[in-house]
Amino acid sequence: MIMTIDQNIVFYGNLSELYQMAKEGKIKTTLQGSHTRPCKFWTATKILSGIKDAIVISHGPSGCAYGVKRAYKLTNSRNSGSPYEPVVTTNMSEKAVIFGGEKELAGAIREVDEKYHPDAIVVATSCASGIIGDCVDDVVNKARKEIQSEIMTIHCEGFAGEYRSGFDIVFRQIVDFMEPPTPERQSQLADAVNIVGAKMGPERTEVETDVKELIRLIEGMGARVHSVIAGDCTLEELKQAPSAAVNCTLCLDLGYTIGKAMSDKFGTPLNSTILPYGISATEKWLEGAAKYLGMEEQAAALMEREYAAIKTEFEAAKSYIEGKLAIIEGHDAIKCLSIAHMLERDFGMRAVIYNFHPWSTEARETSVDYLLETGLDPEILITKGTLAFGKYESMKQTEDELLDFIGGLDPESVVYFGSSLSFPHIPVVDLNAILNRPRFGYRGALKVAQCIKTALQYGFRPRSSLTKQMVFPKNSGLASAQSLTGKLAQDLPDCTVYAQKRRGKCFNE
């Protein structure tokens, strides 16, 4: 039983109440400096990195391109074995900032076209080129007549909008690469869907990823996936994408942006749902796709087969965890809302989202609206640490505040969904540590239910020194299961982290 609200509580109530307070300006919705997000340039280039055989030219200082290369392109190559695609910079100097960098940009476009012969070149503006007002569009329009590659400008200078706008602007603008549907293409793609709203490059070859699970389910009802946008999609796939039978969102917020743009411009239908964590969300996702594919009967048969395959184990796990309390770490708004939906609708648990920053009510408005429209209105707990200086999702202050709030709970009655770097005195389930995925779909629902059951059953046990050595290798700095080799990651004991006896000692020696 949750105890009485104390002085550390900023908000405790339902999501709909917090949403209304934020709209009325009755609660602070701005992020502190310590909670800063990536800039618009970073989020834009993250989406662009998922377009295959396309080269991004960063029009700005070299450091901007370096960050994008390290964070996205090299990670894509390392994860999947795909050839590295360069991120090019115009390397704006102090001189260029004073006199303009248009000449350097024109030269970079010609050099990239001649040297790499990409399908597409995307010029991404940085703060430097945006502030001085370089005529980037004029340079690009002139170059379009002189090069073989298709080319586009993305105005994504970091100072000119919050981080979310970088995702949105790219998803709206890459629609310009697309071609209107034709009867011939629509006939060829009548059994195909696009998965839209992806923000990564190639899939990891050795891991059963969530997107692969969605593709498996689509294929299981007799359809196919034309393209994952923008998850290693090609320019040709983008051109043909409007002719597919339907766009199915991956991330609702981002998928809705491009799905709405394609619907407005080309009339492509949109199946818009939250992340398909759990059975009910997965079925909603499949039913939405089947509606436009004309495969309602096939989808029903697929859902029956998929549930039958997990039924015995799932119901056994559900009977154990039903009625238990789940505290969900709220710093990833999209994920925590989807997890709350799964825990309440599929597992019969009571879900409380902990430290869902009020800022998220504006940044993730599409997902919040959807969740409320489905009739789910989860409890939200926000403590003072969320609005204080520090890393609010895993700092000692918020941990203390959570423990004060929940009181002396039996470890068998409550589980914490969040980062393994947080150490409340209750069992922890870290979904990011599930390397032998998927987490979506029926198989994902079973996996999560089993993780919760295991965490609760073994909540009395300390974390092992062996796990400590695996996750935090000596002399290697802070590591995680995500950084391990594919084979070792597959062999990890999944996502449960047992409870412990002393704060600050995440593992017993």
Image (tube, rainbow, N blue to C red):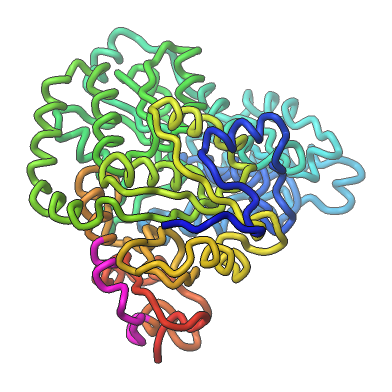
**Whole-percent x and y of residue 350?**
36, 48
Name the image quarter holding the C terminus: bottom left
Q: Position of residue 246 (x, y in %)?
A: 33, 21
Residue occupying the point 59% across, 44% down: 43
Q: Quadrant of the N terminus?
A: bottom left
For the residue pair 127 and 409, the one nearer the viewer reads as 409
Residue in the picture at 17% in, 20% down: 295
- Quadrant assignment, res 83: bottom left
- Check the image and report above or below for 237 versus 98: above
Front in this rendered view, residue 333 or 95: 333
- Residue 133 in view, yes or no: yes
Q: How many labels does the image show?
A: 0
Picture quadrant of residue 130: top right
- Residue 209 within the segment the image draws in magenta: no
Q: Which sits in the foreground, 39 or 439?
A: 439
Q: Residue 66: tell me if it is visible.
A: no
Q: Residue at x 46, y 56 (%)?
A: 2
Residue 461: give x, y in percent of width and height. Answer: 30, 80
Indicate left or right for 25 with 303 as reference: right
**Which residue occupies the extreme top position in the image?**
183
Q: What is the x, y in percent for residue 153? A: 65, 31
**Magenta stretch: includes residue 456:** yes
Vertical relation: 183 (above or below) 321: above
Q: Looking at the image, which is closer to me, 190 or 325?
A: 325
| Extreme residue in the bottom direction | 509
Residue range corresponding to the magenta coloring: 453-467
Q: Is residue 34 above or below residue 351?
A: below
Q: Vertically, is 97 above or below 206?
A: above
Is residue 500 rendered to the left or right of residue 146? left
